[in-house]
């Protein structure tokens, strides 16, 4: 994703996936809730095509923050 606060994906790989018809599992989340790194970047993403995402999120820092420098992301998929 681009810098926080921008709605449009700026990063070339993300933009290419969206343009190719892949859906961003976390698109419905506010930008600030997508952050997965201490640097404030939403770097860990889930994409799918031909599926419906029914829920998605980022693991809470209070639970997962000590295990890695990235928070886990998750998505519930309906086929």
Image (cartoon, rainbow, N blue to C red):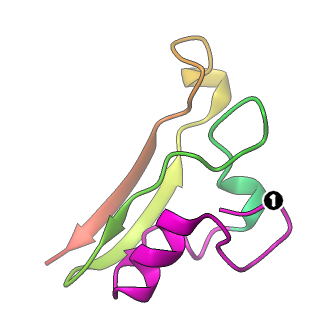
- Residue that protrudes farthest toward the left in the picture: 79
Q: Nearer the viewer, residue 79 or 35?
A: 35
Q: Nearer the viewer, residue 4 or 55?
A: 4
Residue at position x 45%, y 61% from top? 56
Quadrant in which residue 8 is drawn: bottom right
Quadrant in which residue 21 is drawn: bottom left
Secondary structure at badge 1 equals loop
- Residue that protrudes farthest toward the right in the picture: 5
Q: Which residues are magenta?
A: 1-29
Q: Main structural element of the magenta stretch: helix, strand or loop?
A: loop
Residue at position x 36%, y 74% from top? 54
Q: Percent x, y for residue 5?
A: 86, 67
Res 26 visible: no
Res 29 visible: yes
Q: Nearer the viewer, residue 52 or 41?
A: 41
Question: Is 9 within the magenta?
Answer: yes
**Residue annotated with mark 1:** 3
Question: Is 23 within the magenta?
Answer: yes
Is residue 79 left or right of 44 when viewed as pictured?
left
Say above or below: 44 vs 69: below
Q: Percent x, y for residue 47?
A: 36, 66
Is residue 12 left or right of 9 when viewed as pictured?
left
Is residue 10 left or right of 64 when viewed as pictured?
right
Look at the image and tell me in which quarter the C terminus lies.
bottom left
Residue at position x 55%, y 67% from top? 12
């Amino acid at each position: 994703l681009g810098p926080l606060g921008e709605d449009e994906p700026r990063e070339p790989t993300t933009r290419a996936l969206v343009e190719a018809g892949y859906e961003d599992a976390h698109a419905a989340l506010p930008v600030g809730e997508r952050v997965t790194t201490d640097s404030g970047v939403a770097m860990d993403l889930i994409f799918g095509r031909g599926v419906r995402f029914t829920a998605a999120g980022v693991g809470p820092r209070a639970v997962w923050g000590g295990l890695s420098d990235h928070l886990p992301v998750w998505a519930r998929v309906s086929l």
